[in-house]
Image (cartoon, helix red, strand yellow):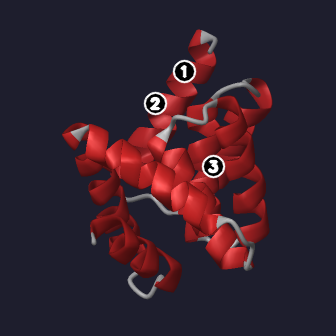
Amino acid sequence: MPDSVTSLYDSGLERYQAGEGPETLIPVFREICDRSRKNPAAWSSLAWLYLLSNKGEQALSAAQKGIKLDPNAPQARINLALAMLETGKTGVRDHVEAAKDMMAASSEIRQDIIDNIEDGLGRKPDWKALQRLKKWLTE
């Protein structure tokens, strides 16, 4: 990632962590993805923001790009599974199982995923797909 894209990503992430909503951050991450098309973290972040905004089809597209660029990214797997649940697509189980395997292999990955799920439920408490996914991942 060029430095300007890196700083834009870091700034967007800080804004998100400070509580800024997805409506204002989607254009920021859309720009990052446009400027750095092969950045799996940016695509994963964009997918998450779309999911928080109830934009399942856009989330699915962004999540698929993220997975294509980095099939071993745990959050990308979570985002793709969520987008698939939100849009009624089949094949969710494969991504859930991959995420579970990654969680089992690393306590740090497990904690990151749990933290992200809690963040999502804090921002969108009635998120049924995320509640289902949480149950599948923690059982």
- Residue at image mark 3: 46
- Image x and y of residue 3, in percent: 57, 11
- Image x and y of residue 70, in percent: 61, 31
Could you say which disc has been placed on residue 71 in the image?
none
**Of the residues shown, which amino acid type is indicated by label 3?**
Leu
Quarter placement of the N terminus = top right
Q: Earlier in the sequence, mark 2 or mark 3?
A: 2
Quarter placement of the C terminus = bottom left
Q: Are marks 1 and 2 in contact (CB under 8 Å)?
A: yes
What residue is drawn where x is 67% and y is 50%?
A: 63
What residue is drawn where x is 43% and y is 88%?
A: 126
Q: Residues within 10 Å of mark 3 (few under 14, many from 20)?
A: many
Q: Which image quadrant for residue 13?
A: top left
- Image x and y of residue 117, in percent: 36, 64
Residue 36 visible to the viewer: yes
Label 2 – label 3 distance at C-alpha: 13 Å
- Residue at image mark 1: 6
Viewer-side residue, 124 vs 44:
44
What residue is drawn where x is 39% and y is 72%?
A: 136
**Of the residues shown, which amino acid type is indicated by label 1?**
Thr
Left or right of 53 on screen, residue 122:
left
The nearer-to-camera label among 2 and 3 is: 3
The nearer-to-camera label among 1 and 3 is: 3
Q: Are marks 2 and 3 in contact (CB under 8 Å)?
A: no
What element does badge 1 sit on? helix
Left or right of 62 on screen, residue 8:
left
- Residue at image mark 2: 10
Residue 18 visible to the viewer: no
Label 1 – label 3 distance at C-alpha: 15 Å
Label 1 – label 2 distance at C-alpha: 6 Å
Viewer-side residue, 86 vs 46:
86
